[in-house]
Amino acid sequence: MDNTPAEQSPPKAFISYSWDDEEHKAWVLQLATRLINNGVHVVLDRWDVHLGSDLLSFMESGLRDTDRVIVVSSDEYIRKSNVPAGGVGYEKRIISAQIAADLDVSRVIPLIRNNTSCPRVPTFLSALAYVDFSNDAYFEEKYAELIYELHGERILPRPSLGSNPFLRHAGADVERALSIDPTRYASQSPEGSVSFDYLNNNGHFNIGMGDRRFTLAFGQSGDGSIYVYNDPSDIDWISLAPQTSMDQIHDLWAYDSSSRHRTALVGDTVVLRNTSGNFAAVTIDLVRRRDNLTGTALVEFHYRVALHGNTDMTDEST
């Protein structure tokens, strides 16, 4: 008997936007294409409306039959949403009716793009949180926020509820229990920078979450270098890209993964594959052995967890 869980249906999203100009239309099309490549069934007029199609019926079914509605809130979209006639105005009335009917308001995700307005979303969406895509320098960060939301994941999930330390400890034991912060040795964001005393927590530090989680295992080497091991149960293999930044890595499979550990120097990037088949890159920024003054050792690094199935750290990595 096959006990493999049935694969969930992909999330389905309708994109509501205005045809401001060719650049804006191209941006929406590129966003929709990337969402499809990352497992989201996108309903978009440029793919799903044909000559002779009933436009009103398309908008009604798109807004009614999808899991989420992505509203690209540009200056022109806000202007058109206040006009009763036209596609944007019609979509506004349908969305407003759903909100008024107390349906799941979280279905609607406003995106800010090509927008100088204040407020930055139409009045009928003013109570909803939005994702700000107005600055291209932060596109990857904002895209990660959107794709996590569409797949029902959390970039920073709620920690598990612990037990009451006063029921398990007494006296000095209570103080010790209260001083332990489990998040000290984990960073669940898909990208970030970390400063870690690698002589603590058995040298282990966790990055990412879910099936994109990686346990980094460090060991003391010398100043300017550190051992990184593939011993943790969630790590399939590790490899080393000497004196290479993660933005220069185009193929994560290209690096030798035949050793149990790697000696990483400052400026090297360690490439990891976990047992779920996903990849991460960790660039070593600083290594310091334990000294007599502080009694601490230190490794500083920045990391990036690739999107599901991605092997190019320079493209769609978060």
Image (tube, rainbow, N blue to C red):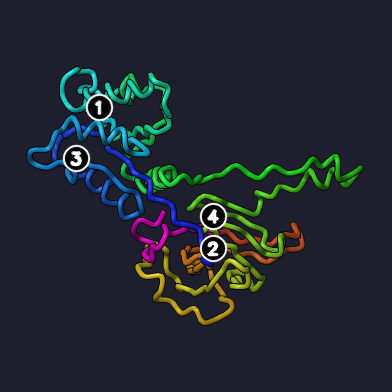
Helix, strand or loop for disc 4: helix
Helix, strand or loop for disc 1: helix
What distance separates the C-alpha of mark 4 from that of mark 1?
A: 36 Å
> Mark 4 sits on what residue?
210
Q: Residue at x 28, y 24 (%)?
A: 94
Q: Residue at x 85, y 39 (%)?
A: 166
Question: From what the image shows, is residue 299 above or below residue 29?
Answer: below
Q: In this orientation, which residue lies closer to the viewer: 262 or 244?
A: 262
Q: Residue at x 19, y 18 (%)?
A: 83
Q: Amino acid at mark 4?
A: Gly
Instruction: Single out the residue that lies furthest toward the front.
Output: 1
Residue range in magenta is: 301-318
Which numbered disc, 3 or 1, marks the residue that appears first in the sequence? Answer: 3
What distance separates the C-alpha of mark 2 from that of mark 4?
A: 21 Å
Q: Can you tell which mark lies on residue 3?
A: 2
**Mark nearer the viewer, 3 or 2:** 2
Helix, strand or loop for disc 3: helix
Using the rendered view, name the quadrant where residue 264 is placed.
Answer: bottom right
> Mark 3 sits on what residue?
45
Q: In this orientation, which residue lies closer to the viewer: 95 or 285?
A: 95
Residue 65: image location, x then y, percent: 32, 37
Using the rendered view, name the quadrant where residue 249 is placed.
Answer: bottom left
Q: In this orientation, which residue lies closer to the viewer: 278 or 150?
A: 150
Within the magenta stretch, is there residue 157?
no
